């Protein structure tokens, strides 16, 4: 029997996806961020800090709270699937990254891959599909297996959602939406916060595309933001794509995900790309 | 690790994308050339300009939003919903939506007051991929140019500040498919046009107009605003206000700096700077480069509302370290002093950032 929130979800075209009204504060986000990439075993360019103001904006709404780990406190293992260390690596996602509805990582990356700034237990990177050496590169399986709590994932990194690599990489995540980039983006200190604030009156998708292309006051047209949405049917994927709104409702985790060690069952996806080109550094 | 010149108020140079300004070719309409430089390429006169941002008043913003909405929808609209939606004290980040009852179709508005950046979109049309008609890129460009003219006639943009022939075109596309089929459907939602303000033919990345044309030919979004440039304009030559360099004399910049701006001699020969970048940043993968005006990203918001911006040879790039690509960075090389260290135009790195402590 449908409860009133499921009825509301049905009315909005989101099926039974709505878990609850966005009212009661609870630990609903996990944020990891790396800005220090010098001399910590995971070399790359140091970065500006872009999730502090995002967290403040989330916390300003009464239904959000959560954790934000930065630099030495940010561990790649937090996103690595924990159901099988031999298959995925020494994961902690059932304690951290896959226990919250919104999972965010800010740092460097590539297609279906993320890089942290501090090496921990030999690991700097994770991959969204597979790894030839899980001690060095862990494997991510959000929204499924152990944890299975992530509904939406935000990748503030280079190329992680490169469109022509979605099928072989990012689509292994069993979430309802992923937000990211098709190329190497420049992201302002407050831009992720502006995306979240913009999710009213806009949808997640529209706000992401409009706010993440260029920061306010800048007209480079360099960034290529992309949103991918999923569902058990094409209609569900499309409804989530055009209707989901982090500020209005909290969606339930995507049901029917694969069990440990298995690949995903049938799913449908819809992605929208504001295509200002890709970057030569994207694989 | 490469160190950068710390930012002072002067900014920049750059390149444009889409091959409109290549590393081998100065921007069209580039400054006049005068004496010969060391390399044998003639030096040119450039302007460094004072720029500022002015926050719109509530009445100004309501009127601007009303006008943009009329252009977007192509029909007359009542002004009352816009007046009612704009508070008397405008926050830095203001958003509102007009109802279908008020404007026929719901429209989303976002205004960033500190940088005078107004964005208006039609969310329903933006998401539409079912309209069978597709006007195509060329058709969309004509619609974009007509919309730009309409904005100019309404006094929202100054046509003389733009060169639409250099406007960049991109697309917004939607792909749909399933895990069991390799068949993927990709539909063009819109053709997107970006016109940056130009100063003597050189693009300025802190002011511009962005217009999206839906596949069916209607406008789905307009974004406009940014910094204002302190200048004098003339069809004939005008004397410089302040002159750097050794030649002095009259200059023939069509747009001359006023206020704290000044004129200087620089090189339009950016091949040396491009080669220098490649040598100094061998791991960098440059996406575009060229001469442009661009304020450091960390200076675009917040702080003082005035700055002096100087054209630089700007490189937009990411660094490849192993298999990982860095987020985008911007670096500006002086065209006035070829030996100067480059200016890091990227957002300021904060390696000392901290967050929660694990329990």
Image (cartoon, coloured by chain):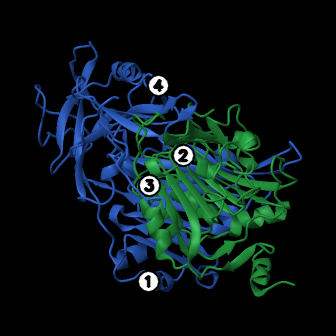
Among the chains pictured, the one given blue colouring is B
- Which residue sits at x=52%, y=61%? B222
Please name the color used to draw chain A. Answer: green
Residue B257 pos. (x, y %): 20, 45
Marks 4 and 3 sit apart, C-alpha to C-alpha, by 24 Å
Figure check: B351 above or below A246: above
Q: Which residue is label 3 attached to? A: A50
Q: Which residue is label 4 attached to? A: B283
Tell me whether the residue at label 4 lies in contact with that at label 3, contact meaning CB atoms closer than 8 angstroms: no
Within 10 Å of disc 2 (Cα), the crowding (few <14, some 14-19, many 20+) is: many
- Which numbered dot is residue B83? 1
- Chain letter, disc 4 residue: B
Asked if one can make out residue A97 in the rendered structure from this viewpoint, the answer is yes
- In the rendered structure, the answer to whether residue B234 lies left or right of residue A222 reads left
Residue at mark 1 shares a chain with residue at mark 4: yes
- In the rendered structure, the answer to whether residue B100 lies left or right of residue B338 reads right
- Which numbered dot is residue A157? 2
Looking at the image, is mark 1 or mark 4 earlier in the sequence?
1
Marks 3 and 2 sit apart, C-alpha to C-alpha, by 11 Å
Asked if one can make out residue B141 in the rendered structure from this viewpoint, the answer is no
């Amino acid at each position: 029997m449908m409860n009133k929130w499921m009825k509301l979800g049905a009315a909005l075209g989101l099926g039974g996806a709505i878990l609850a009204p966005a009212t009661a504060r609870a630990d609903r986000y996990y944020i990891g961020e790396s800005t220090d990439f010098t001399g910590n075993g995971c070399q790359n360019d140091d970065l500006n800090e872009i999730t502090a103001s995002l967290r403040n904006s989330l916390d300003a709404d009464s239904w959000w709270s959560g954790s934000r780990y930065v630099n030495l406190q940010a561990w790649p293992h937090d996103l690595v699937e924990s159901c099988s260390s031999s298959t995925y690596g020494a994961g902690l996602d059932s304690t951290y990254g896959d226990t919250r509805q919104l999972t965010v990582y800010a740092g460097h990356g590539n297609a279906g891959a993320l890089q942290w700034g501090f090496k921990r237990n030999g690991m700097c990177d994770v991959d969204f599909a597979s790894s030839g050496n899980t001690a060095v590169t862990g494997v991510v399986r959000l929204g499924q297996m152990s944890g299975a709590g992530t509904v939406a994932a935000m990748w503030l990194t280079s190329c992680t959602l490169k469109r022509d690599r979605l099928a072989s990489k990012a689509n292994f995540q069993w979430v309802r939406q992923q937000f990211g980039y098709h190329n190497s983006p420049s992201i302002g200190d407050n831009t992720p916060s502006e995306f979240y604030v913009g999710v009213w009156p806009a949808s997640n998708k529209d706000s992401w595309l409009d706010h993440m292309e260029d920061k306010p006051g800048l007209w480079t047209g360099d960034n290529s933001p992309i949103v991918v949405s999923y569902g058990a049917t094409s209609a569900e994927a499309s409804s989530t794509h055009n209707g989901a709104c982090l500020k209005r409702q909290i969606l339930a985790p995507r049901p029917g995900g694969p069990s440990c060690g298995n690949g995903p069952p049938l799913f449908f996806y819809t992605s929208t790309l504001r295509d200002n080109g890709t970057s030569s550094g994207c694989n | 690790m490469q160190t950068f010149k710390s930012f002072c108020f002067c900014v920049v140079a750059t390149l444009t994308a889409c091959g409109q300004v290549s590393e081998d070719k100065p921007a069209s309409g580039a400054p006049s050339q005068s004496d010969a430089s060391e390399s044998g390429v003639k030096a040119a006169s450039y302007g460094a300009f004072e720029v500022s941002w002015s926050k719109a008043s509530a009445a100004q913003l309501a009127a601007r939003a009303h006008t943009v909405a009329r252009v977007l929808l192509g029909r007359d609209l009542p002004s009352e919903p816009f007046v009612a939606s704009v508070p008397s004290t405008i926050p830095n980040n203001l958003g509102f939506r007009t109802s279908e009852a008020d404007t026929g179709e719901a429209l989303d508005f976002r205004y960033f007051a500190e940088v005078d950046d107004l964005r208006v979109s039609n969310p329903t049309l933006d998401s539409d991929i079912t309209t069978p008609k597709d006007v195509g890129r060329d058709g969309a460009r004509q619609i974009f140019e007509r919309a730009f003219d309409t904005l100019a006639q309404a006094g929202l943009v100054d046509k003389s500040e733009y060169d639409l022939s250099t406007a960049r075109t991109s697309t917004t596309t939607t792909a749909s498919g399933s895990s069991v089929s390799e068949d993927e459907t990709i539909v063009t939602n819109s053709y997107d046009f970006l016109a940056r303000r130009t100063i003597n033919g050189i693009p300025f990345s802190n002011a511009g107009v962005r217009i999206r044309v839906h596949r069916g030919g209607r406008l789905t979004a307009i974004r406009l605003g940014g910094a204002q440039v302190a200048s004098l304009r003339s069809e004939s030559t005008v004397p410089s206000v302040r002159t750097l360099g050794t030649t002095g004399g009259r200059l023939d910049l069509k747009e001359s700096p006023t206020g704290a701006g000044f004129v200087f001699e620089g090189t339009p020969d950016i091949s040396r700077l491009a080669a220098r970048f490649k040598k100094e940043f061998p791991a960098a993968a440059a996406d575009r480069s060229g001469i442009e005006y661009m304020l450091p990203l960390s200076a675009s918001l917040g702080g003082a509302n005035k700055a002096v911006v100087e054209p630089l040879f700007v490189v937009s790039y990411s660094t490849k370290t192993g298999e990982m690509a860095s987020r985008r960075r911007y670096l500006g090389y002086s065209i006035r002093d070829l030996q100067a260290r480059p200016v890091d135009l990227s957002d300021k790195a904060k390696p000392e950032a901290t967050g929660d402590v694990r329990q």
